Image (tube, rainbow, N blue to C red):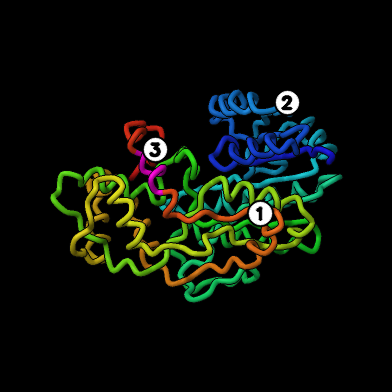
Amino acid sequence: MEKGVYLITGFPGFLSLNIVAELLKQDKASKVYLLHLGSMKKQAEEGVRKLKTASEGELILVEGDITRPGLDMEKEKIIEIQEEVDYVWHLAAIYDLAVPRDLAQRVNVEGTRQVNDFCQTLRHLKRYVYFSTAFIAGAREGELMEDELIRPERFHNFYEETKFDAEVLVDDLKDRLPITIIRPGIVKGNSDTGETVKFDGPYFLMNMFKRLSFLPWIPFLGEGTSYINIVPVEYVVRAAIYLGHDEVGHGKTYHLTDPAPLTVKEVYGKILWQMLRKKPKGSIPLSLSNWALGFRFVRRYLRVEREALDYFTLQGKFDCQQARGDLEGASIHCPSLSSQIDKMVEFYLENSSNERLHVKID
């Protein structure tokens, strides 16, 4: 198979690092242009140093900004990329539930608009892979299908809203560009090692449990009957790489989600038991928890974003039959979350003192 030339945005983010590593491992890339912000130069250089041990593929750091025309790259580099690149993977975004509207709009929507425009100038584009999120569904209820792009009556935060608006921009180009849209669930660390680069999502529960470990018992938050969709990074990466290259993925949108998700109560109980060997007792209404997290000192002490509580009450369930069907031939499957919690907790406990892994709580 002929190797490709790639442009990856959002380097050196968690997903982009893992995707580049897997592209190199599968020997798919002869050259990878890695777009990074100037402020992330040191981290980008460190990311490349780690990746270069995995393959002989050429890795080229490119300083730029997706919110500006030409992605704010030097003119010579623009011409070079326009002539050489076969695949664009757009991962740059603000992945923060508490992001303010203006910043989310600028990066997630206007940034995607600029990447769309740039993709239309490429001479040899074989595939444009856009990373959205399953949570563009906002507060929609019931079965949520992969071929639906329906604006919900309500979003939980500006992250969801701007990612929806950005996906609309990409989806509108499907008749002009070879596009694959990926909608992951909540992406956690590696299922085999537990390794992650940021303690968000389910790790907020671990932060809270660690702070409250002195209590004789810890109550549930709310009823916990909603499903929470958490997927390991290596599943998302392998699935996206397959669907983003094979002809079967051309023009499609996929939910890379757990087909058999656990309820919030199940996840809560399993993590608490793995961490502290305690079982939840009693329940605190979510309204009271939400009120308490309205105080900055409480959020900072527990290291939990208030917006995370919204995912305790989701009434939608992500259908992923198209993804499962198209991945069947590649034998790529999402492992059960129950089988991963021990490694997830183990990594957290070993690294909880590393401040670089924690989300800054305002």
State which region is magenta: 341-348
Q: Report the amino acid beneath label 1.
A: Ser
- Number of numbered callouts drawn: 3
Picture layout, residue 149 above or below residue 267? below
Q: Is residue 188 magenta?
A: no
Where residue 342 sits, quadrant-wise, is top left
Crowd tier of the residue under label 1, counting other residues whose Cα lies within 10 Å: few below 14, some 14–19, many 20 or above = few
Helix, strand or loop at label 1? It is: loop
Estimate the spatial distance between the alpha carbons at disc 2 and disc 1, rounded to whole Å: 27 Å
When asked about the image quadrant of residue 334, the answer is bottom right
Q: Position of residue 355 (x, y in %)?
A: 36, 32
Q: 130 or 77, which lies in front?
A: 130
Q: Which residue is mark 3?
A: 347
Q: Circle 2 sits on which residue?
A: 56
Q: Which mark is residue 275?
A: none
- Label 3 CA crowd tier, 10 Å (few <14, some 14–19, many 20+): some
Q: Out of 41 and 264, give the one closest to the viewer.
A: 264
Q: Of circles 2 and 1, which is in front?
A: 1
Q: Main secondary structure of the magenta part?
A: helix
Q: Of callouts 3 and 2, which one flags the residue occurring earlier in the amino acid sequence?
A: 2
**Contact? badges 2 and 1 (CB < 8 Å):** no
Q: Nearer the viewer, residue 273 or 53?
A: 273
Residue 109 x, y percent position in the rendering: 60, 54
- Mark 1, residue position: 331
